[in-house]
Image: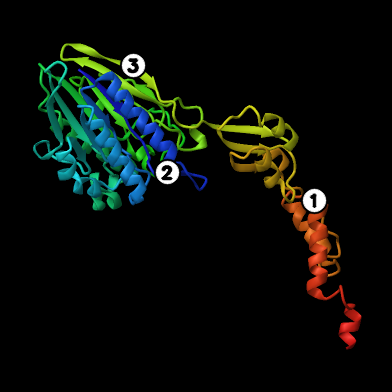
């Protein structure tokens, strides 16, 4: 049989306040096209369909249209909740999704209530068993009393054991004459982070060894870590990675979907198919003049810009004028160093407001005479120095 493995769509995710819904739609259309071209028997979506537990109506429309588009190819479509998804909301859609040929699993379920999905591959007739494990938070895996009474190490071991027990139950029905798959959303020890994961639910307390997966599994389809990678394990364990970089920390990742071919008697064969519809994320550095030279080489990439000159009024506007796709503009740390302020021995009472403001600018690494001039102009206007002297006001 042949199937696609994808995960971590994060539909609705914005980048520095900029909506990427149009990009996300192009990427998901590309995945549907790949499923159609490859004539796959199934598509496994290993969690984090959405970026938030309360997705917008537009984000929900896009995910629903994508799942229906995948089902329209004739493939079995199975999707589970990740840590960003609202598990109960996904389960609420189960009856409607099922009528469209889509299996949604929000919360962890027993095998007889949806924790195991079985079907026959349309291309070969081979029986397929998929054990599905949505994201399971520690507070549900470890009782609250244990969190208080036990050490962090004991709680980590308890989380590990609970997942082993759940997987053991779900995979107990694996068949010798069929293709056995596991799909889960979790952190495997020694996995490499993509750069945009939610750290609070990816740390050591949530990590489990790859050895928890049974050797009888022909393939384990994982979601949660956004970088494409294979984990060392007794059976094939893979993260597909995110098909669209969600933050600049992921700009080096290569977005793919995994095409997997497996039979009951042979190891899985995995082919990475690039996903190219998303806009590249890129970091550039230089002075405004140097960035101006680069402007013709960045195409439609979204940019994070490190400016290698001191801060001054209007600097961001100068950068965005030459690089309109700059979503983030920062001063290079070398030029943002806070200098030591030299305070006159007389203290602050004898110094003018302009001198104090200049000292403040120095602590912020800003050296711009225009800002100082503007401050003096505003101060004079507010204090009345532009119409009458302080002596005259005092004697009037």
User: What's the CA distance linking mark 1 and mark 3?
Assistant: 55 Å
- Residue 368's label in the rendered image is 1
Give the vertical position of 282 relative to 377 (above or below): above
Please report contact status of discs 2 and 1: CB closer than 8 Å, yes or no.
no
Q: What secondary structure is marked by label 3?
A: strand
Image quarter where the N terminus lies is: top left
User: What's the CA distance linking mark 3 and mark 2?
Assistant: 27 Å
Q: Residue at x 23, y 13 (%)?
A: 267
Image quarter where the C terminus lies is: bottom right
Quadrant in which residue 374 is drawn: bottom right
Task: State which mark lies toward you, 2 or 1.
Answer: 2
Mark 2 highlights which residue? Answer: 13
Name the residue furthest top.
Answer: 266
User: Residue 274, position in %: x, y?
Assistant: 41, 22
Quadrant in which residue 185 is drawn: top left
Give the vertical position of 119 relative to 10 (above or below): above
Q: What secondary structure is marked by label 1?
A: loop
User: Residue 229, position in %: x, y?
Assistant: 38, 23
User: Residue 190, position in %: x, y?
Assistant: 39, 27
Mark 3 highlights which residue? Answer: 271
**In this view of the protein, can residue 154 be seen by the observer?**
no
Q: Residue at x 25, y 40 (%)?
A: 158
């Amino acid at each position: 049989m042949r199937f696609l493995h994808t995960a971590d769509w994060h539909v609705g995710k914005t980048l520095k306040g900029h909506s990427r819904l149009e990009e996300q739609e192009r990427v998901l259309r590309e995945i549907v096209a790949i499923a159609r071209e490859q004539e796959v028997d199934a598509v496994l979506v290993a969690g984090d369909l959405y970026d938030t537990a309360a997705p917008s109506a537009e984000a929900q429309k896009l995910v629903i249209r994508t799942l229906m588009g995948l089902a329209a190819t004739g493939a079995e479509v199975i999707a589970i909740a990740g840590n960003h998804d609202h598990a109960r909301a996904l389960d609420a859609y189960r009856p409607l999704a099922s009528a469209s040929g889509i299996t949604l699993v929000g919360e962890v379920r027993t095998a007889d209530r949806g924790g195991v999905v079985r079907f026959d591959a349309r291309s070969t007739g081979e029986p397929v068993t998929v054990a599905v494990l949505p994201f399971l938070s520690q507070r549900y895996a470890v009782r609250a009393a244990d969190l208080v009474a036990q050490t962090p190490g004991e709680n980590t071991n308890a989380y590990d054991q609970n997942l082993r027990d759940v997987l053991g139950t779900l995979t107990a029905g694996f068949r010798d004459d069929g293709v056995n798959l596991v799909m889960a959303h979790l952190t495997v020890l020694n996995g490499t982070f993509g750069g945009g994961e939610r750290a609070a639910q990816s740390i050591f307390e949530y990590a489990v060894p790859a050895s928890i997966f049974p050797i009888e599994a022909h393939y384990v389809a994982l979601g949660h870590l956004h970088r494409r990678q294979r984990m060392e394990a007794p059976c094939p364990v893979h993260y597909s990675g995110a098909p669209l970089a969600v933050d600049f920390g992921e700009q080096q990742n290569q977005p793919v979907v995994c095409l997997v071919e497996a039979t009951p008697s042979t190891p899985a064969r995995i082919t990475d198919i690039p996903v190219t519809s998303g806009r590249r994320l890129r970091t550039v550095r230089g002075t405004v003049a140097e960035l101006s030279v680069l402007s013709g080489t960045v195409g439609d990439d979204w940019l994070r810009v490190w400016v290698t000159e001191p801060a001054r009024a209007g600097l961001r506007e100068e950068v965005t004028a030459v690089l309109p796709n700059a979503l983030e503009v920062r001063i290079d740390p070398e030029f943002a160093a806070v200098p030591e302020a030299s305070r006159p021995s007389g203290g602050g009472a004898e110094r003018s407001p302009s001198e104090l403001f200049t000292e403040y600018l120095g602590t912020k690494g800003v050296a711009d005479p225009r800002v100082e001039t503007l401050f003096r102009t505003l101060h004079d206007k507010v204090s009345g120095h532009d119409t009458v002297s302080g002596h005259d006001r005092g004697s009037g």
